[in-house]
Image (cartoon, rainbow, N blue to C red):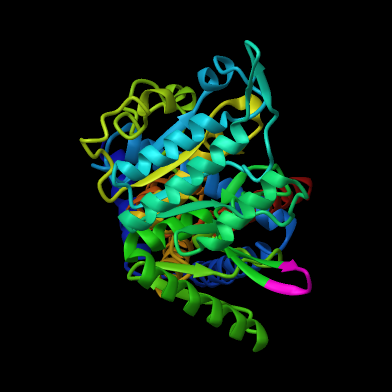
């Protein structure tokens, strides 16, 4: 019993002396310095690896994991009191809308769409975002001997919607298209758009998909368009919705013009980094294929109910923020429902084809737009690399190097597991969810842990060979 006590006391003294930097051996000091070097090299490699295909896979893996953990923490476990901004309402055109309609499910019913747009404006919404391409005419139908031309009806409704929008000082955001069709409907449609640019805003519905696995991880801020030898800057639908909702039409137009001028000047001056602040906590960046843009990555709060069920029993954050199109048009106009809100109108029917893969599962385009908009409205944009992240990284490398220097004799694997799973993972999730700081410090610690285990194996082999040589002699 006394020998066991002495053994434990001796080991405790050795460990204490190492922890307090007392009686560090030359081997301990060398191990600590080498850990620092390898950890720094790993961090350097990780930073520049993002420009490569392998690097993108690494960051996507870390990001996807954090996105799922963030969603579970914020929505499933209810750590965020209001996951979805109260300024957002979605009016989906679902499966029933298409299968019960006379159009047979091949195109969006124009009459219903026109009614929803008009009613949204009458219900005092500040911004109506329509995620449908309706620059093309739909087929003329014959029903019981009667000709039904929804194209003419929709154009009439669009003109009515413009009048209401001007009166209510609201805006209608619709997708920008880079081609014009030569037909009577398209001509009249374009005329309405061109004559009412003060309330009808064209925006990009572009969705960024990864070339590696076709998943949507990045939102779109704006894109450069070449049209008839002219260079255009087309802002994204959620960004325009955010600006006009936050500032109104006049100030919103001014802000957008200022950003356009800054973008043009930055491009002329060939600035690699184009960053423009539009709100106290929101920045937009020029996105390129050769540069990773962390602040453009999504923090998802809105997913289809089918995907939500995979997380078990939890409240749907869209429960009171979603109204089916057919149900909505029955609402009483005398009781405004959308005071100062943004109404998002789009399809959730998978056969229409606007379904995209994300780290949280498949979701319709209107949900992806809603997630981008929600992130902007709630000021939850992921932070660009900043001094806080670099300070945390430096501290993490020093602590890891120190731990792997004092822990030996086969405990390296357990220490590595403890650092990555017990400390790094929950800390990364908390920083990502609460402060929008994306950290991926797993590689420096992993490299140190692997190196320590290799050193352990080398020492074991060396000792074995020495003992064998002595026995032979």
Q: Quadrant of the N terminus?
A: top left
Q: Residue furthest bottom?
A: 269
**Image-based side of 13 in relation to 414, left or right:** left
219 vs 328: above or below: below
The answer to whether residue 430 shows anywhere in this view is: yes
Query: Which residue: 60% across, 86% down?
Result: 265
> Is most of the magenta stretch helix, strand or loop?
strand
- Span of residues in magenta: 226-231
Horizontal side of residue 392 vs 28, given as left or right: left
Q: Position of residue 127 (x, y in %)?
A: 39, 52
Residue at 68% of width from left, 38% of height from top?
137
Quarter-of-image position of residue 131: top right
Q: Residue at x 36, y 45 (%)?
A: 121
Q: Is residue 470 left or right of residue 260?
A: right
* Quarter location, residue 283: bottom left
Identify the residue shown where x is 37% and y is 38%: 119
Q: Residue 45: image x %, image y %?
A: 65, 66
Farthest residue, direction top: 144
* Above-or-below relation of 16 to 159: below
Q: Decide if residue 459 is in sight here.
A: no
Q: Residue 418 at what x, y percent from top left? A: 43, 45
Q: In the image shown, does 376 or 68 lie closer to the viewer? A: 376
- Residues 174 and 140: in front is 140
């Amino acid at each position: 019993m006394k020998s066991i006590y002495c053994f434990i006391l001796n080991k405790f003294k050795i460990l204490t002396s190492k922890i307090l930097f007392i009686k560090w051996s030359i081997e301990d000091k060398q191990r600590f310095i080498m850990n620092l070097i390898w950890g720094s090299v790993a961090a350097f490699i990780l930073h520049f690896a993002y420009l490569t295909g392998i690097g993108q896979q690494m960051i996507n893996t870390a990001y996807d994991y954090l996105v799922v953990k963030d969603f579970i923490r914020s929505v499933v476990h209810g750590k965020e009191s209001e996951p979805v901004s109260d300024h957002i309402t979605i009016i989906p055109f679902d499966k029933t809308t298409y299968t019960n309609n006379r159009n047979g499910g091949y195109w969006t019913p124009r009459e219903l769409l026109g009614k929803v747009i008009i009613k949204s404006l009458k219900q005092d919404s500040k911004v109506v975002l329509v995620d449908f391409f309706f620059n093309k005419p739909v087929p003329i139908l014959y029903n019981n001997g009667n000709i039904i031309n929804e194209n003419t009806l929709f154009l009439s409704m669009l003109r009515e919607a413009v009048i209401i929008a001007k009166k209510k000082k609201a805006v209608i955001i619709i997708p920008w298209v880079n081609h014009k069709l030569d037909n009577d409907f398209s001509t009249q449609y374009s005329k309405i758009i061109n004559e009412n640019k003060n309330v009808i805003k064209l925006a990009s519905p572009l969705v960024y998909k990864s070339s590696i696995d076709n998943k949507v991880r990045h939102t779109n801020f704006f894109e450069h368009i070449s049209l008839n030898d002219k260079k255009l800057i087309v802002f994204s639908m959620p960004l325009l919705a955010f600006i006009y909702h936050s500032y109104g039409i006049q100030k919103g137009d001014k802000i957008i013009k200022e950003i356009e001028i800054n973008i043009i000047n930055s491009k002329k001056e060939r600035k690699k980094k184009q960053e423009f602040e539009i709100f106290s906590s929101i920045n937009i960046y020029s996105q390129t294929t050769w540069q990773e843009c962390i602040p453009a990555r999504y923090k998802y709060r809105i997913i289809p109910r089918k995907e939500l069920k995979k997380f078990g029993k939890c409240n749907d954050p869209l429960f009171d923020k979603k109204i089916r199109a057919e149900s909505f048009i029955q609402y009483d106009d005398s009781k405004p429902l959308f005071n100062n809100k943004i109404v998002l109108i789009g399809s959730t029917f998978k056969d229409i084809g606007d379904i995209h893969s994300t780290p949280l599962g498949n979701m319709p385009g209107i949900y992806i737009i809603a997630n981008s908009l929600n992130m902007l409205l709630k000021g939850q944009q992921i932070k660009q690399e900043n001094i806080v992240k670099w300070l945390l990284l430096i501290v993490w490398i020093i602590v890891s190097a120190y731990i792997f220097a004092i822990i030996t004799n086969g405990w390296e694997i357990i220490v590595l597991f403890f650092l990555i799973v017990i400390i790094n993972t929950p800390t990364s999730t908390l920083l990502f969810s609460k402060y929008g700081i994306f950290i991926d410090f797993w590689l420096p610690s992993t490299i140190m842990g692997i190196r320590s285990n290799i050193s352990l194996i080398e020492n074991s082999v060396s000792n074995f060979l020495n003992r064998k040589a002595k026995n032979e002699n």
